[in-house]
Image (tube, helix red, strand yellow):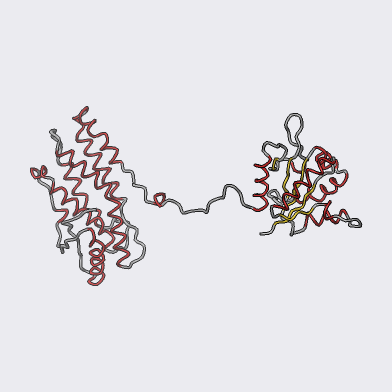
Amino acid sequence: MKQKVFISYSWSSPKHEEWVINLAERLMSDGIEVIIDKWDLKEGHDIFDFMESMVKSPEINKVLVILDKTYSEKADSRSGGVGTETQIISPNVYKNASQEKFLPIVTERDDEGNAFIPTYLDGRKYIDLSSNEHFEENYEKLLRNIYQRPSFQKPKVGTAPKYLFEETPKSFKTSQILRTFDYQIDKHPKRINSIIRDFLEAFYKNLKDFKIEFVGRDNMGIGKQICDNIHEYTELRNDFLDFVDKLTKLEIEFDFDIIINFLEKLPLLENPDESMSSWSQFEFDNFRIINHEMLIYLVATNSWRMYYIPLTFLKTDTTTIIVNQKLLMNCIGILIQLINITKKLTLKISLVQWQI
């Protein structure tokens, strides 16, 4: 794309004017059309109109403001042609904080190394062409700025990492109890009943939080919510299994009635509480599945065979459906369909094979 610039500078000295012309010629050789008074302002032209048109013209991509000591002094005092240009340029700079059309180019510094910059350009990022040592490097920066081809291209915005939006595993109090279980039993074995009671109460409280608020009433949608709910429950389930495993390996006697009382509470989760005026049977199917699964795990623990485990909380007329992980969704969908069709049929799933 063709670029066009206007050079604003001060006639500070013949040497400085020659420097500006050399810069203009080099820019022309690098494909940039340069408008400068020595080439384009003819006798009879209106000087003020020429300057104003260069500053405001949409055809001018950049106004290169060549800064030296004389330019800065005249700009601040608003004297001479520089003062006139300053009066035209400064309102355009001040009204737009992100103005990129006016590009300061430093060509001279004071004895302390400070660049000569007029007040209206103070704080603006500039290109430094005052040093022969770094001239070529900074001249390239000037070209890149004019052509809008920066050395460091801003990359396109990508997509956020998927793991940021994955569900964070829930933290349960049961996990905290498990972490200190061995230490507590070793140091305070007489606290065994309290520890068991604390764990089972925390487990039951956490389990109640898995009550599903169903969205919609379509069979597959309900089935998916139940499936997702049971999947989310697995961390809590694993805490329960670890706890059972620890109990079966203990050589300390404990009050087994605590376990019985806990098991007798589980059926309460399969039925509506008193605050519910209306409900559907499927709303508690996740707890029915969870309870059946817990029974299977308990029975599968050999060490528990020596104890009497009350099964009354699972006694019911059931239709047993053998499922695996892949068929779980379909089985739950079939379950809901049968309930909706019969209205009076209570169908429960006994999971004899469950892997999540």
Q: Quadrant of residue 353?
A: bottom left
Q: Residue furthest right?
A: 44
In the visual, does 280 lie left or right of 61?
Answer: left
- Residue at x 16% of width, y 61% of height: 322
Q: Quadrant of residue 34?
A: bottom right
Image vertical order of residue 202 relative to residue 316, above or below: above
Quadrant location of the N terminus in the rendered image: bottom right
Q: Residue furthest front?
A: 29
Residue 141 image point, x, y percent: 65, 45
Residue 272 image point, x, y percent: 28, 58
Image vertical order of residue 310 relative to residue 226, above or below: above
Give the mark count: 0
- Residue at x 25% of width, y 63% of height: 332
Q: Residue furthest left?
A: 306
Residue 83 image point, x, y percent: 85, 45
In the visual, does 152 lie left or right of 75?
Answer: left
Residue 352 image point, x, y percent: 15, 56
Q: Quadrant of residue 246?
A: top left
- Residue at x 11% of width, y 44% of height: 304
Q: Nearer the viewer, residue 209 or 77?
A: 77
Q: Nearer the viewer, residue 122 or 114?
A: 114
In the visual, does 50 lie left or right of 286?
Answer: right
Q: Residue furthest top?
A: 187
Image vertical order of residue 213 relative to residue 173, above or below: below
In the visual, does 223 lie left or right of 65?
Answer: left
